[in-house]
Image: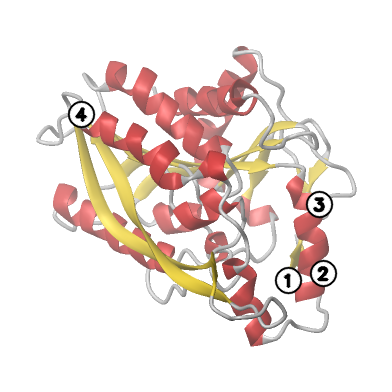
Amino acid sequence: MCEIKSEPWSEEKFKKWYQERPIVTARDYVNTLVPRIKALGERAGFSLEKYGEASYTTRSNTIVSDTIDDAVKKTSKVTHDLFRLLIGDFSQDRPCYIVIGGTHGYEKGGPLAALKFAEKEAAQYTDRFNIVIYPCLSPGPYEKELRFTEGRIDINRDAFLDGAQSQEMKALAKSVKELHTRLFKGDLNKKFAAAIDLHETPFMDIAIDKENAEAGGEMFELDIFPKGLFLIAFEDDLKLANKIIQNVRTEGHHVVDDDTLYGSPNHGGILIMSEMGPVTGRVRQLFKHFTTACFTTEYCDVGLTDETPDAERVDPQMAAIRGMFP
């Protein structure tokens, strides 16, 4: 990816950018995801924990002026709970795996795959492993179908242990530190076994690329739109990365086969972090402090939209999650 500089937006435009986007009814966080998350928390061997909150400023439909010409819409605060699920017996010293969804809100497949895995398959692993699931890191952008959070901040460029700007990443960093301290007594020689952060490259990225050019932001180099799933991995995690990609293939899903991806060499469906240039603030980098191995998936399709059947976007991600486990 590259940076293209242009005339920057005003502070006021950045401020209003999130506020003026409407909530998509079919994505309403409280009505669509939260009931599934809370239902999982009631299962035996599942523990639901609230690790923080995220508050968003949104335009309401209430008119506060007497004339249409001078109509001004009110803003209101919407606060969403941030959840994680702990699955297994955490009193036992077992390898612990982490699944993350909803880093970029508009990428619907991440939360759906994380929740489907929790609902349908996670319990079968709990005789050997413990599992932590963060189903939706950014609920506000999820329900507005946005990549960025309020202030047009990309939280996957803001994932720092200290000094994050976004409320979502401040909460996540605190959560991961607290969980590691609880389970491993703060001993950094002990780590979670692996973490996988579920992403998509959908049709909307083309429009986002154009808006980024106006706002003065990161460009995605989508002249050739990839198709299928690929993985981003650290060089010392390649053995497990290859196992994950092989499982995606074995289950019948297409792995991206272009020679290069975003300007970096494609190693059979794997991008290696050290070959991607200066990259900072990624969720995989945050979790790498606390895990032996950490990955990002990307399921790509120029035809991928909210109308795409859930199975098409979820099943490749599920195959990647399964591939992470021994």
Which residue is at the front of the view, 306 or 256? 306
In 3D space, how far apart are the residues under numbered discs 4 and 3 (Cα atoms)?
41 Å
**Mark earlier in primary sequence (1, 4):** 4
Secondary structure state at the residue bearing disc 1? loop
How far apart in space, not on screen, are marks 1 and 4 (Cα)? 42 Å
Query: In percent of the image, x 81 and y 51: which residue is there?
Result: 206
Q: Is residue 278 above or below residue 29?
A: below
Which of these two is toward me, 291 or 33? 33
The quadrant of the picture occupied by the N terminus is bottom right
| Measured Cα–Cα span from mark 2 to mark 3 | 11 Å
Task: Please state which amino acid type lies under the numbered disc 3.
Answer: Ile
User: Amino acid under label 2?
Assistant: Ala
The residue most toward the front is 66
Between tags 4 and 2, which lies in front? 2
Element type where label 3 sits in the image? helix
- Label 1–label 4 contact, CB within 8 A: no
Bin the neighbour count of mark 2 within 10 Å (Cα to Cα): few under 14, some 14-19, many 20 and up. Answer: some
Q: Which mark is residue 206?
A: 3
Identify the residue at image location x=81%, y=84%: 7
The residue sitting at 28% across, 30% down in the picture is 40
The disc at residue 88 is: 4
Q: Residues within 10 Å of mark 1 (few under 14, many from 20)?
A: some
Quadrant of the image containing the C terminus: top left
Determine whether the residue tagged by mark 2 lies in a helix, strand or loop. Answer: helix
Residue of label 2: 213
